[in-house]
């Protein structure tokens, strides 16, 4: 049976009556200079079918050779995911026909992956930590790219013709497969999103991939099933293919929970199938009946010898691993003195790199956080920008804070200076000079403004002389108004008390 949007069960109702279990297969394109099994160069955006060799085109007699850098990158990923690294592993042929697979098989790994039995901890936005177990991480090659012309939304159905670009065919991939992720309950979509985001951050930290989801460097296939209770057997799963954003991973899980609940409520059965994710409408649609492993007729690749990384090499790679994102966050939080909620806000805002660079440029951790999580975060939200895309550099933010620390600016004037920087008027110092924003600290103009304020409110002087210091604030306010906010409030207070004796 099929279910339309109007038939969907609400997500909250669905998770009250069913227990969702998900699994995710993440494919990451490795950032090697050449392809997995041939010397064709790899670069994004090249003219179609210009980065090919007889091997990547599947021409008869062309023999593959394993890319050693890709193997090293795969081991890096496996170690970062707490996996065991195989002493010996091999490639296999995964047989299927599709225009973007010119050999009619994909060279992958099947029963002997390079990495297996791992785990990573993912942190949710409220600080909850959820462990996801990794079944395997294996090497393979990417397929080419089909472009369907004339169909709806680029789909093959209804297309007039298709174009095939083999530039991507043969690019090294690592596919990371989770074990079934149970126990997340209503938070399953959130955990799924956080898991993929955690992997993306790890890939970047390891420097094995640009990991840009908008370019397809990282793609996720989302498996989902429902069962009556956490003690029930696993239900029939669907696999939503090629989801390429964090938000879409979360939305795809939510949609499939609601859709499958509606099917089960109506007495239907879930079909084990692949499904297409539609970003524009936020729904999945049926693709094809899901193939099992035996349908691909896997057999060992006869043209490649087993890969046998020595233990010494594996340990050398392990020793050279960079600091991973979770450890880095803990270290920076300790160095910066942020509370747990403050650090979570920084991480969730995508500000950790910006604050680190601002501190490195000379700002205090508190000052850097104040600007990035305050004025700049508001600016980004109002204009629907990523924080990193705000038109100000970390050096300029540090310079702005240094002007505040030196007493050249107060917070109000600093905000005006920042407005000028964001408007493209120059550096903070240049904006201060051009707009005349520096704090007035010369006693002469301040005393004149204080005398005017006291003359306008003669009773205040008597109250102050009588020991009531509350009215001092009124004089300070009047002086700040007279100097357009450029007075040094602390110095004004000192001068007021001196003036009234």
Image (cartoon, helix red, strand yellow):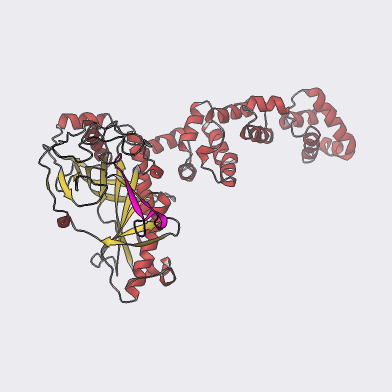
Q: Is residue 157 left or right of residue 247?
A: left
> Does residue 485 appear in this view?
yes
Q: Can you say whether 57 is above or below 222 in the image?
A: above
Whether 317 is among the magenta residues is no
Q: Which quadrant holds the N terminus?
A: bottom left
- In the image, residue 265 lies at what x, y percent? 34, 75
- In the image, residue 42 lies at what x, y percent? 31, 34
Near-viewer residue (419 or 46): 46
Q: Residue placed at 19% from the left, 52% from the top? A: 96
Q: Can you say whether 458 is above or below 431 in the image?
A: below
Q: Can you say whether 285 is above or below 121 in the image?
A: below
Quadrant hosting residue 269: bottom left
- In the image, residue 420 lies at what x, y percent? 66, 33
- Taking the view exactly as shown, the residue that stands out farthest to the front is 160
- Taking the view exactly as shown, the residue that stands out farthest to the bottom is 267
Q: Residue placed at 22% from the left, 42% from the top? A: 140
Quadrant hosting residue 74: top left
Q: Residue placed at 25% from the left, 65% from the top? A: 236
Q: Is residue 402 left or right of residue 78?
A: right
Magenta part of the chain: 148-168
Q: Is residue 386 left or right of residue 96?
A: right
Q: Which quadrant holds the C terminus?
A: top right
Give the total number of marks visible in the rendering.
Answer: 0
Whether 157 is among the magenta residues is yes
> Does residue 407 appear in this view?
no
- In the image, residue 150 lies at what x, y percent? 40, 55
């Amino acid at each position: 049976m099929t279910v339309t949007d109007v038939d969907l069960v609400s997500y909250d109702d669905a998770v009250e009556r069913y227990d969702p279990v998900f699994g995710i297969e993440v494919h990451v394109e490795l950032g090697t200079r050449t392809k997995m099994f041939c010397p064709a160069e790899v670069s994004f955006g090249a003219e179609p079918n210009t980065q090919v060799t007889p091997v990547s085109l599947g021409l008869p007699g062309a023999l593959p050779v394993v890319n050693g850098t890709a193997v090293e990158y795969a081991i890096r990923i496996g170690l970062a995911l707490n996996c065991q690294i195989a002493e010996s592993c091999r490639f296999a042929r995964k047989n299927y026909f599709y225009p973007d697979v010119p050999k009619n098989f994909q060279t992958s790994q099947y029963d002997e992956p390079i990495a297996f039995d791992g785990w990573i901890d993912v942190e949710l936005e409220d600080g909850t930590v959820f462990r996801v177990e990794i079944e395997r991480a294996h090497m393979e090659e990417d397929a080419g790219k089909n472009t369907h012309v004339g169909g709806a939304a680029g789909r093959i159905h209804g297309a007039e013709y298709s174009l095939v670009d083999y530039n991507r065919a043969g690019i090294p991939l690592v596919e990371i497969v989770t074990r079934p992720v149970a126990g997340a309950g209503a938070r399953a979509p959130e955990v799924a999103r956080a898991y993929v985001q955690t992997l993306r951050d790890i890939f970047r930290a390891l420097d094995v991939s640009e990991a840009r989801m908008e370019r397809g460097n990282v793609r996720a296939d989302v498996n989902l099933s429902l069962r009556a209770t956490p003690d029930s057997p696993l239900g029939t799963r669907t696999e939503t293919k090629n989801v390429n954003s964090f938000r879409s991973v979360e939305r795809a899980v939510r949609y499939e929970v609601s859709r499958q609940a509606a099917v089960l409520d109506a007495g239907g059965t879930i079909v084990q199938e692949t499904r297409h994710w539609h970003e524009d409408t936020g729904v999945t649609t049926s693709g094809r009946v899901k193939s099992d492993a035996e349908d691909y007729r896997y057999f060992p690749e006869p043209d490649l010898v087993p890969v046998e990384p020595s233990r010494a090499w594996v340990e050398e790679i392990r020793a050279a691993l960079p600091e991973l994102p979770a450890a880095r966050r803990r270290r920076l939080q300790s160095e910066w003195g942020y509370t747990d909620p403050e650090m979570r806000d920084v991480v969730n805002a995508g500000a950790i790199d910006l604050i680190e660079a601002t501190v490195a440029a000379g700002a205090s951790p508190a000052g850097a956080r104040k600007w990035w999580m305050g004025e700049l975060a508001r600016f980004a939200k109002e204009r629907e920008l990523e924080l990193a895309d705000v038109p100000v550099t970390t050096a300029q933010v540090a310079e702005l804070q240094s002007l505040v620390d030196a007493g050249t600016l107060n917070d109000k004037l600093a905000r005006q200076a920042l407005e000028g920087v964001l408007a493209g008027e120059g550096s903070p110092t240049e904006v201060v000079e051009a707009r005349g924003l520096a704090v007035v600290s010369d006693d002469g103009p301040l005393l004149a403004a204080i005398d005017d304020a006291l003359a306008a409110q003669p009773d205040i002087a008597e109250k102050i002389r009588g020991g009531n210091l509350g009215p001092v604030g009124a004089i300070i306010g009047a002086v700040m108004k007279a100097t357009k906010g450029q007075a040094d409030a602390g110095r004004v207070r000192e001068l007021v008390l001196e003036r009234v004796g």
